[in-house]
Image (tube, rainbow, N blue to C red):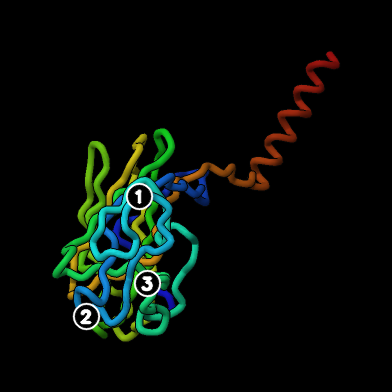
């Protein structure tokens, strides 16, 4: 099953619920690694739409979107879903070529971000693949270094890392740096959201009070 790592206390706002997605317009990073750097397969971002060599280990990619934002969530560990063509769902970075990889996400205009979710492979060390040891989130005016604690060490299924209550306000970009816990970090999806206000339903007492006020107003008008 998928697991969730809550890295920060969730933001609680009276009278609000739910979240609204914040969609990146592009992201930039070093391309994933592959057979040229100790991989059994190639773990590139082959679907990346921007500039850069999508079939070259560690190549600089910029100005586009790809595997990390395509909505495709890996159903299994890298060994079952990756291939030589590099078209699998994960982007994988080998620490010998790209230690502690950083991905910079860009947005249209200024946005607020309360939650970041990262879907990562948790192979428990198979092939040197583990969840990142920590994630450094950086934005204009602030940063948060968050250790990743696996809540279910017995499971090696892919994991959702859920960083909530961030309170990031009015930024045009956010960077995520994944610190290695082993030789490889594998990420296949990153999503962003901001808290969205939703009116809470009125309680029966409040509803009765509203009816009473309305009746009193009508009686005053009759006079």
For label 3, the SS is loop
Task: Residue under label 3, please give it.
Answer: 86
The quadrant where residue 84 appears: bottom left
Q: Residue at x 44, y 57 (%)?
A: 69
**Along the horizontal axis of the image, is 143 left or right of 64?**
left
Q: Position of residue 78 (x, y in %)?
A: 36, 79
Q: Position of residue 201 (x, y in %)?
A: 63, 46
Q: Mark 3 or mark 1, which has the lower sequence index?
A: 1
Q: How many marks?
A: 3
**Along the horizontal axis of the image, is 28 left or right of 181?**
right
Q: Nearer the viewer, residue 27 or 219?
A: 27
Quadrant the N terminus occupies: bottom left
Instruction: Report, in whole angstroms, how far the alpha carbon at label 1 lies from the one at label 2.
Output: 30 Å
Task: Residue under label 2, please give it.
Answer: 128
Q: Mark 1 or mark 2, which has the lower sequence index?
A: 1
For label 1, the SS is loop
Q: Position of residue 168 (x, y in %)?
A: 33, 42
Task: Residue under label 1, please give it.
Answer: 51
């Amino acid at each position: 099953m998928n697991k969730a790592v809550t890295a920060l206390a969730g933001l609680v706002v009276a009278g609000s619920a739910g979240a609204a997605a914040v969609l990146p317009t592009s992201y930039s990073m070093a391309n994933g690694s592959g057979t040229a750097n100790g991989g059994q397969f190639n773990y590139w971002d082959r679907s990346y739409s921007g500039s850069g060599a999508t079939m070259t280990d560690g190549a600089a990619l910029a100005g586009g979107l790809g595997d990390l934002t395509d909505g495709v969530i890996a159903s299994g560990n890298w060994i079952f879903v990756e291939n030589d063509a590099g078209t699998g769902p994960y982007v994988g970075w080998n620490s010998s070529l790209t230690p502690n990889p950083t991905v910079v996400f860009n947005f249209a205009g200024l946005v607020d971000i309360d939650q970041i979710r990262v879907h990562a492979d948790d192979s428990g060390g198979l092939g040197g693949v583990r969840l990142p040891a920590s994630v450094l989130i950086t934005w204009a005016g602030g940063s948060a270094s968050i250790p990743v604690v696996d809540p279910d060490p017995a499971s090696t299924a892919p994991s959702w890392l859920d960083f909530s209550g961030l309170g990031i306000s009015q930024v045009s970009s956010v960077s995520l740096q994944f610190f290695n816990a082993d030789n490889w970090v594998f990420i296949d999806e990153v999503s962003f959201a901001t808290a969205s206000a939703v009116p809470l339903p009125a309680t029966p007492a409040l509803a009765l009070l509203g009816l009473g006020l309305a009746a009193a107003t009508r009686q005053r008008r009759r006079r």
